[in-house]
Amino acid sequence: MNAVPKNQLDDRPLPERAAAAPRRLVALTHEKALVASLREVAALGADVAVIHDELELTQELMEEPGSIALIDAAAISGTLEQRAWLRVRFTARDR
């Protein structure tokens, strides 16, 4: 194992280093205009996944824990209040 020279170490706190890392955007939507916009963002080099149901959303976020979720309220079943588990489940581990 080779030692890393001190001048090459990243001394920033972990949250700052994590924030600087590339992250995947996972979008749950059925809105054609939003999908088109996300395709444009992906064409610029961003890592974007467009998914179409809540099960896919859960799977994507579990596989890529550093992902950012964009949830179109029209794409979920039930009300946002009924889906509070999304906020609790996926933000608790980021603390």
Image (cartoon, grey):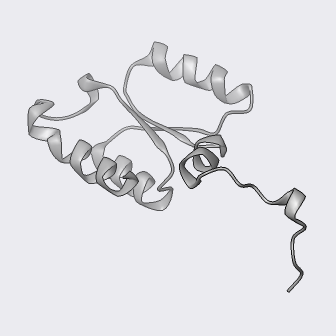
List the single residue furthest toward the front.
6
Residue plotted at (86% across, 64% down): 6
Tell which of 55 and 13 is nearer to you. 13
Residue 48 percent across, percent down from the top left: 58, 37
Given residues 86 and 72, the one toward you in this image is: 86
Where's residue 69, x and y in %?
A: 41, 38
Q: Is residue 18 above or below residue 79?
A: below
Tally the marks: 0
Instruction: State which quarter of the image contains the N terminus.
Output: bottom right
Q: Is residue 71 above or below residue 35?
A: below
Q: Measuring 59% from the left and 43% from the top, which residue is drawn there?
A: 23
The residue shown at (87%, 58%) is: 8
Residue 56 sits above or below residue 8 on the image: above
Locate residue 7, reporting x and y percent: 89, 57
Tell me if 9 is positioned left or right of 56 in this view: right
Q: Nearer the viewer, residue 30 or 42?
A: 42
Q: Residue at 42%, 52% (x, y): give it.
A: 61
Q: Residue furthest top?
A: 33
